[in-house]
Every structure is written in C-alpha cells, then in structure tokens.
Amino acid sequence: MNRSGVDVYTEALKVEGHGGPVAATQKNLNNSAHTTLTEATAAFGGTAFSGAGRHVSCLDCHDKHATNSKKWPTSPTFARNVPDLCGKCHRTDAKAAKRIDLAKNGKGIDIVKSYRQSIHGVGLLEAGLVVTATCADCHTAHGELPPADPKSTVNRANLVATCSKCHHGIGDVFQASVHGTSNTKAKAKLPVCEDCHTSHQISRTDGADFRMLMMAQCGNCHKQEAETFFDTYHGKVSRLGNPRAAKCYDCHGTHDIRPPSDPTSRLSRERVVETCGKCHEGSNRKFAGYLTHATHHDKKYPFLFYAFWAMTTLLVGTLAFALVHTGAWLFRLWRTKDAWSALHAHGAERKLVRRFSARQRVMHIIMLTSFLTLAITGMTLKFAYMAWARALANFLGGTPAMGGIHRFAAVVLVTLFVFHVKDLFKLKSESGKSWLGFIFNPDSIMLGGTDLKEFIGSVKWFFGAGPRPAYGRWTYWEKFDYFAVFWGVFVIGSTGLVLWFPALFTNVLPGWSINVATIIHSDEALLASGFIFTIHFFNTHFRPDKFPMDTVIFTGSVPLEEYKYDKPREYQRLVDTGMLDESVVPPMQESVERGFRIFGFTALAIGLTVVVLIIYSVIFQYR
C-alpha cells in the first residue's frame, strides 16, 4: 500500500534523537494542509528550486546517520550552526537565493552575511549567546511561510508578536503607541519592527549608523516633519554627520510614541520640559515653546513668516542695489582709463602718505580673520545639505569642533567690537563735542548729508552727466561698509548669544524667539558674507584702478599721487593745514609688504571660494 509523504515524514520524526516534540511538528504539517512529501517539505522551506532538480528534505538539515538534538553543539540545528545551515541555500547565489525576487527583497542584500553582522549574529557567533534569535526563532523550524502569507510568523500582522517572544513587554508598549494596531485613525500603513530595525541587518540602537538611519526612516512617512526638522540646528548638524545631535526618537520616543495631547507622551505639557532637559540643562516652560517643526513659509507662524520675508527683502534689496551701483561704477572706470592707469606705476622715489594707524590695521586683521572663520563655519552649517559642506565639516573635525571654532571666532569679533566702542567713547571725550556733533562731524565715518550729495554726484559721473566728486577722508561707500559691519556685528552677535544660550534667554523671551533668532542670525550672516566677498572686495580691491589688491589696510600707507586722485578733498585739507609733510611715511620693508600681500590674496581667495559655494548652493536648493 502506498503511503503519503506526510506518513513517511511522520514516521521519520519518531526516530529517537530528533529534536522537538513530534506532536507539535505533526500539527504544523497538518495545519499547512500539505499531503505529499513535496507539500510537507514546502511547509518548512522545501519548495522546488529552479534548476535544482530536488526538494529540501529532513536530512538536509538533520544529517543522515548522526542526527543529534538541537541542544548538542555538534548538531547542524544547534543555535550557533543555524546561520551556516540556512546559508547553504539562502546565502547569495545559493539555490534559494536565486528564487528571491530581488526587486521586492532588496537587490544585492546577502541575507546570511547581513545576519552575521547584525546584533543578533554578533551576539550568537562572537559572544556565544545561544539564546540570541536565529533564523528558526523568527521563521520557525518547520512552518516557514512567505512574509506575504497571513499565517507567516514574519508577516507584518504577526511580526510584533514574533519579536516580542524575546523582547518581552516592548510589543505591548508599541501596540499602545500611535504606531500600534489600535490606531484606527491612521490613513497610511503603520510601521512594524522591521521598518525601523530591518529584517536581517539589525544593529545596536545606540550606534551612530542606527541614529543616522532613523532620520531618513521616519521621513519616509513623515515627509513634511522631516523637511522642517532639517531646517533646525539639530537637523543641520545631523546632516553634517553628527550622530549625537537630537534625532526624531530622542524627543518623540521609540516604542512609546504618543500624541502630545496624551499626558503620558514625552511631548505633552506635563513632560516636554523634562524631555528637553535631557540635553538642554536649564530647560524651562518657555524654552519648551520652541517651534520644532514650524516653517517660515506658513503664515500660521506670523513671527517666523514676517521675520523671514523682512530679512529676505533686506538681503535681496541690499545686494541688488549694490550690484547695480558696482556695475555703473565699473562702466565709468572702463571709460576713463586714462585718468587712473598711471596710478599703478611704482617709482622708486614715490612718496607714501599714512592713512591708517598701526592700531587700526591690527584691528582690521583680527576682524578679517575672525569674520572669515565665522563665514566658513556658518555657511557650512547653513548649507548642510550640500556635499561640500559635509566634506568641510569633516575636515574641520566634525560639527562639535566646528561649533567650538565658530564660537571662539564670535567671541574674538564681539570682543573687538566692544574694544572699538570703548575707543569711540574715548575719542568722543577727547573731542569735547556732544554725541551728535561727534558722530556727524566732517571727519566722522558715519553717513551724513555730504555723503548723500557725493552719492548723487557719483551717479551722475557714472553716466557721464557730471564730474567725479571730490571725495574726502571717507567716501560714502566706505562709510556704508563701516555702518554695515557695525550693525551686522550687533545683530549677528546678539542673535548668536540667544542661540548659544537658549535656555537662559527663554527665562525672559518666548520659545519662538529662538526660531526668529535663527532666521535673523542666518540671513544677516548670509548678507554680510555675500556683501563683503563681492561688493566690498570690488570697492577695495577688484575695481580696475585698484586691481589686483589695495594693500593700504595692511601697510597703512598709500602713494601720494593715488591719494590725491582718490581723496582730492582730504588731500587739499592736508595741504591747507600744513599737515601733508607730517603724513608722509617711509616705505615698508619689501619682505614685510610681500607677506601682507600673500596674506591678503589668501583671504581674497577664501572669500571668493565661499561666495561661489554660496551661489552654487542657493541655485542647487531651488533646482
């Protein structure tokens, strides 16, 4: 009498030495409704392999004549041997792997290799933890079914229960969260364990790779929230490769994510200060009011919306006006080359006139160096989505080091600013004038009525409608540069302090002030960098009558004929007051001047590189 494959298989299971209760195995087979040997083997991974010519049978896993209990280290089904056992068919290019639909299961993923490198595989194979999950713990030993099968232990509907067999309690916490099956309001597909932890590449959750992966993983479903997250400081430094910066689950939780309206949520009113306080010492109620996922593109957040558009208008308007002014000036210089071309002659007997004191030159070098440092580190953070920014952040030692460099340079620049203000008070006291008289006296570097007249005269000269104005000690564009730096240091410095010590300042200011400070600090810095590295560089160095560099700010002196052409009114004042001879100085040592030129050209090259990267990044952002 012919016997079915199930009868043959059932009798085989009765042989002494086979691991696992016979009754349980029989039940698995009966529940699978397999009635032939082919069907029986299919129940535990034995479907036919294309081109293999046979099916997986019991002896492929349990040996022929040396079958031992799975508790024996020499048994193929012993926990430490299971990866190699399953790998005979499931590793890349093996028989079972050839049947995998790579388009659905991940092209190029070696399942067995991934498992061996995962936290489960490392624990099992390197640490010898035989209680660690193996292939059989997730897929079962004799009841393997495709993940799409509702009865499969790795089907999405059953996966939480499967993982919970080892990770006790986490399943219950997860099921009670917004991602759990109890959430019937969710329109999108809810995540399960493998969506965050993967199936076979499971890594430690405290590792840098996992923390960085989670940003993209959460963003797969929460796209808008991910976009706004990457606009924040946390998001930007994360993009630059900092794994320690707060990620989604640091604030929202991992398996216990609940809506903020739930008192048990980490972001509820009852717990949000505590959550922020994990990283921000001194966290308070106002600090927790920081708008994490707010966007300045939405009028729902009016302070952010109008702050952004005010700064954008200022930035675009200032640069547009300055570029038109520069273009017109350049046009006139090309048309009047004969008037200034001889000024570049460097005769041996040329006279030099002192324009800047040693104190002023040292202050400018300090300001130049600190500003370049701030621009480099600040623009790297602002354009964190660019590859060049990530490369530069790595070169500077990572975002923690870059942040330290940025703050050090900021302290230097603010200290210089305070030092300069102190000088102004001293000069005002020595002048014996009122503040109004001191600020707007003829030698002042603050803009006044004379500058408006010279500006109108310059515009006429640009278009051939009048003579070139007789500029005095300070031209209107030099005064504007000074005012812009004075204003910029104050604005960028004050907002930078708010961002440096947010918990301290929000004892007084509302939480959204941090958002506004971020916008103002970022856009004012962008305006300063763009203006200095384009307009200021042209006004000072790149205009044809100064090209390739005006070293006066480094050497302190300027050729007499050049000074007479540039500042005719100031030159005449020195002649009339008899101070011209006192202002004549000897030339600087050639080697020292050469060193200043090298330093100056280096600064120009860095500045131009930064502005090119800014322009490229802005264009790339809106492509």
Image (tube, rainbow, N blue to C red):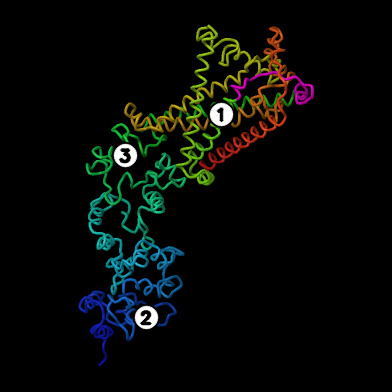
Q: Nearer the viewer, mark 3 or mark 2?
A: 3
Q: Nearer the viewer, mark 2 or mark 1?
A: 1
Total labels: the figure holds 3
Distance Cα–Cα, label 3 vs label 2: 58 Å
Q: Is residue 74 above or below residue 238?
A: below
> Which amino acid, by three-letter code, is at mark 3?
Cys
- Residue plotted at (38% across, 29% down): 303
Q: Is residue 582 above or below residue 620?
A: above
Q: Nearer the viewer, mark 3 or mark 1?
A: 1
Q: Is residue 61 magenta?
A: no
User: Range of the magenta residues?
Assistant: 337-361
SS class of the residue under badge 1? helix
Mark closest to the chain's N terminus, 2 or 1: 2
In the image, is 441 to the left or to the right of 518?
right
Question: Which residue is label 3 attached to?
Answer: 276
Instruction: Residue 130: give x, y in percent of width and height.
Output: 30, 68
